[in-house]
Image (cartoon, rainbow, N blue to C red):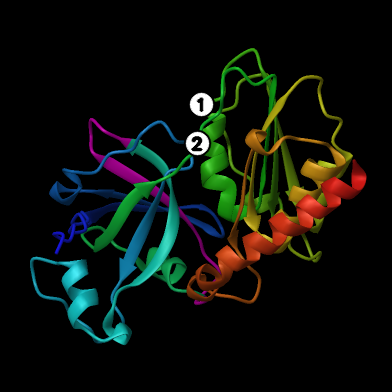
């Protein structure tokens, strides 16, 4: 019998809360540090993300923490609950990791944790993952998303090459949620205020109305899944943007928590790709 290949043990990082700041009324910035980040690092991606691990209420884990043992030996209801968040910044010299959290009162899991975090609190996480970075060879760049994509878009803006036009379209609840972004003069930041409109309506409208500069675009489009589906059709079918020019995905979906969304995301994406292929074929 062939020897079975063992799965590589995953590194669980442990960050200590160094500071907590309300960047806007609904965005909380948490900076993590400490010796538990000794093995953490990010690559070239500007959409790097981590999987935060929250123990269910009343559940404690022995040290050293071993997520594979926990998932192999304990019932599922005792597994850590994961939530995915973008790395806003990583300072390898100071070994400080900054994560921005969208907070809506007591709704959700990670947002309330961030709002109540205090220096010295500990947070375990896996990662990072990620796959997008602004390509210097692109003629121009399009960055579009809601609050969930704002950290990745902000990180990307800071890495956009000079001399290339970029349009960043950011939908937020209102004027109070705008942030100062380190954009060079060729980056045009468009803040879109949702107000009482449905999530994504202002973003889709703005992308549709945007006058595309000449040349090949590299687009980063993330946020609510239904909105992203509309924008994907707009870009691929109506605008003819090639698939390789897009980084596009739903970070979340209205009416579903992350567990429910992640369990259906692959099937959702498959249907979206099939619909897209049919529309492109009909238009050709």
Is 194 left, or right, of 243 in this rendering? Answer: right
In the rendered image, the vertical position of residue 195 relative to residue 57, given as above or below: above
* Residue 155 numbered mark, or none: 2
Determine crowd level at label 1: few under 14, some 14-19, many 20+ residues with C-alpha closer than 10 A. Answer: some
In the rendered image, the vertical position of residue 64 relative to residue 57, given as above or below: above
Quadrant for residue 59, please give it: bottom left
Please state, as top left, top right, bottom left or bottom right, where the C terminus lies in the image. Answer: top right
Please state, as top left, top right, bottom left or bottom right, where the N terminus lies in the image. Answer: bottom left
Label 2 sits on a secondary structure element that is helix
Residues shaded magenta = 91-107
Identified at 73% across, 23% down, the residue is 216
* Residue 180 numbered mark, or none: none
Q: Are marks 1 and 2 in contact (CB under 8 Å)?
A: yes
In the rendered image, the vertical position of residue 228 relative to residue 88, given as above or below: below
Identified at 16% across, 43% down, the residue is 38
**Residue on which disc 1 sits:** 159
Label 1 sits on a secondary structure element that is loop
Give 7 or 134, whichever is nearer the viewer: 7
- For the question of whether residue 34 can be seen, the reply is yes
Q: Position of residue 279 (x, y in %)?
A: 85, 52
Determine crowd level at label 2: few under 14, some 14-19, many 20+ residues with C-alpha closer than 10 A. Answer: many
Q: Position of residue 118 (x, y in %)?
A: 29, 62
Query: How many numbered discs?
Result: 2
Q: Position of residue 228 (x, y in %)?
A: 70, 54
The residue sitting at the left extreme is 63
The residue sitting at the front extreme is 1
Quadrant for residue 44, please give it: top left
């Amino acid at each position: 019998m062939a020897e079975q290949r063992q799965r590589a043990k995953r590194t669980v990082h442990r960050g200590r809360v160094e500071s907590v700041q309300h960047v806007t009324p609904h965005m909380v910035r948490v900076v993590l540090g400490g010796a538990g980040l000794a093995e953490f690092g990010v690559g070239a991606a500007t959409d790097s993300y981590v999987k935060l691990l929250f123990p269910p209420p009343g559940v404690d884990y022995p040290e050293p923490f071993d997520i594979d043992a926990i998932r192999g030996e304990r019932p599922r209801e005792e597994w850590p609950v994961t939530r995915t968040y973008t790395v806003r910044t990583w300072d390898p010299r100071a070994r400080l990791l900054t994560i921005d959290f969208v907070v809506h009162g007591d709704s959700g899991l990670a947002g309330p944790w961030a709002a109540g975090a205090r220096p010295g609190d500990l947070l375990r996480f896996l990662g990072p993952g990620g796959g997008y970075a602004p390509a210097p060879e692109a003629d121009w760049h399009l960055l579009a998303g809601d609050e969930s994509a704002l950290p990745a878009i902000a990180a990307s803006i800071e890495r956009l090459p000079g001399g290339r036009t970029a349009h960043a379209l950011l939908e937020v609840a209102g004027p109070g949620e705008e942030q100062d972004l380190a954009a060079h003069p060729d980056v045009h930041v468009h803040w879109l205020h949702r107000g009482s409109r449905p999530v994504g309506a202002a973003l889709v409208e703005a992308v549709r109305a945007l006058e595309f500069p000449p040349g090949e675009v590299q687009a980063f489009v993330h946020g609510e899944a239904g909105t992203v589906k509309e924008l994907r059709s707009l870009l691929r079918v109506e605008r003819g943007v090639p698939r390789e020019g897009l980084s596009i995905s739903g970070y979340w979906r209205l009416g579903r928590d992350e567990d429910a969304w992640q369990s259906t995301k692959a099937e959702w994406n498959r249907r979206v790709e099939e619909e897209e292929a049919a529309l492109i074929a009909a238009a050709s």
